[in-house]
Amino acid sequence: MDRRVVGFHQDALGDWVAELDCGHSQHVRHDPPWQVRPWVVTPEGRRRFLGATLQCVDCDRSPPRQEPSATEEG
């Protein structure tokens, strides 16, 4: 599922991690040629990426629980 980026932090190794609006997080490394994300290495680049969407694999694995509607509760 696509989720919006709401913030960033660095992990224990200094790699950047995007904080997603679903509460999950995702590494956003710049490690050419495998991962090319030059925007992540500067504060301005990360600021510009706020609000962008990333695929959340955690949400894909187990979609958010939907609350039952009033008609389903009986």
Image: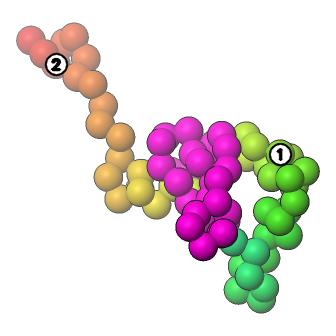
Residue bounds of the magenta highlight: 1-28
- Nearer-N-terminus badge (2/1): 1
Say above or below: 68 vs 38: above
Colour mapping: rainbow
Q: Amino acid at mark 1?
A: Arg
Q: Where is residue 27 shown, x and y percent of the image?
A: 60, 65
Q: Is residue 11 magenta?
A: yes
Identify which residue, 72 or 51, lies in the foreground.
51
Is label 2 in contact with label 1 (beta carbons under 8 Å)?
Answer: no
Query: Which residue is at the far left?
Result: 74
How many numbered tags mark residues here? 2
Q: Which residue is mark 1?
A: 47
The residue shown at (79%, 62%) is 40
- Indicate left or right for 1 with 29 as reference: left
Residue 3 in sight from this viewpoint: no
Which of the 4 image quadrants contains residue 36?
Answer: bottom right
Q: Is residue 37 above or below residue 66?
A: below
